[in-house]
Amino acid sequence: MVGCGDVGQRLVRDQHLNGGGPRWLALTSQREKRDALRALGASPLVGNLDDARTLRRLAGLAHRIVHLAPPPGDGEYDPRTRNLLRSLRRGRLPRSVVYGSTSGVYGDCGGDWVSETQPLRATTARARRRVDAERSVRSFSIATRASVLRIPGIYAPDRQGGTPLARLQRGSPVLVAQEDVYTNHIHADDLARACWMALWRARARRVYNVNDDSQLRMGDYFEAAAALYGLPLPPRVSRAQAAQELSAIQMSFMSESRRLRNTRMKQELRLRLRFADPLAGLRPGR
């Protein structure tokens, strides 16, 4: 496991609790996290994706790799993924590699349906770094089944910042209906399961949209969540007004509209969603 954050921890923990699962190795750059990783059932490995010298011991160490570490916060490329793959080439190659990317690589699609064959039109540097990482992973080696998961907004009530509750409590606005955008979601538990299934079932150099079945505009999503939490509906404003109140990164999410098709995920990974829409996953006790 490279990038053992919330989703990675869910995957390791679930497999450990099921018993009889694989032996997990978890790469971390923070020595103080070693005990927490051991408690999850993983063997910690100290290494830093920004320092290729610390990754040499990874060569030939694992049969299968889940790579969920994000790129750096600036630039047009992802040197972290390049460092990781370069270290893996020095030893016995892994049988499969799964990389967690973002659906942001598609850019704005005007609300159209988007399958994995859609041409990429990444408009932000953040998304272009992901495009670079995807290309590195898919061209890694013909001896390794490398696949890419394109992931939209991840949510879960037990995930830090994983619900719209705080934003609703702040009274942050959403766009008026005529300017609203479609948004896509995946529950963190379903995403962890998708990573696991991709390790074994994904086709070589294959891309998968990993999202639930919902077709929600962003404003409708926040309004439905407000009703679920018993909070006032968020104010509806124009895009010009929103730009005066929200951060640049928040506005970037409100500038792209698409509806992701998940047919390939269901047919090839054979993932059965536990949470087919975000409102089911946001309900208390879930």
Image (cartoon, helix red, strand yellow):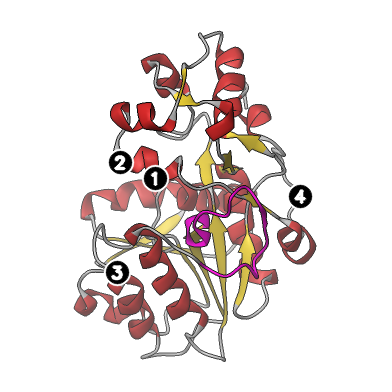
What quarter of the picture does the C terminus occupy?
Answer: top right
Classed neighbour count for the residue bearing mark 3: other residues with Cα under 10 Å, few (<14), some (14–19), many (≥20): some
- Determine which residue is flagged by label 4: 272
- Determine which residue is flagged by label 1: 252
> Mark 1 is on which residue type?
Ser
Which region shows up in magenta?
Answer: 103-120
Whole-number angstrom distance, CA of label 4 to CA of label 2: 35 Å
- Determine which residue is flagged by label 2: 248
Q: Residue at x 59, y 79 (%)?
A: 205
Q: Is residue 170 above or below residue 133?
A: above
Classed neighbour count for the residue bearing mark 4: other residues with Cα under 10 Å, few (<14), some (14–19), many (≥20): some
Q: Residue at x 44, y 60 (%)?
A: 68
Residue 203 is situated, as x and y percent measured from the top left of the image, at: 68, 77
Whole-number angstrom distance, CA of label 1 to CA of label 2: 6 Å
- Determine which residue is flagged by label 3: 76
Disc marking residue 17? none
* Mark 4 / mark 2, whichever is N-terminal: 2
Instruction: Judge whether residue 103 can be spotted in this image.
Output: yes
**Mark nearer the viewer, 4 or 1:** 1
Which secondary structure lies at badge 1?
helix
**Mark nearer the viewer, 4 or 2:** 2
**Mark nearer the viewer, 3 or 2:** 2
Q: Main secondary structure of the magenta part?
A: loop
Q: For residue 198, which quarter of the picture?
A: bottom right
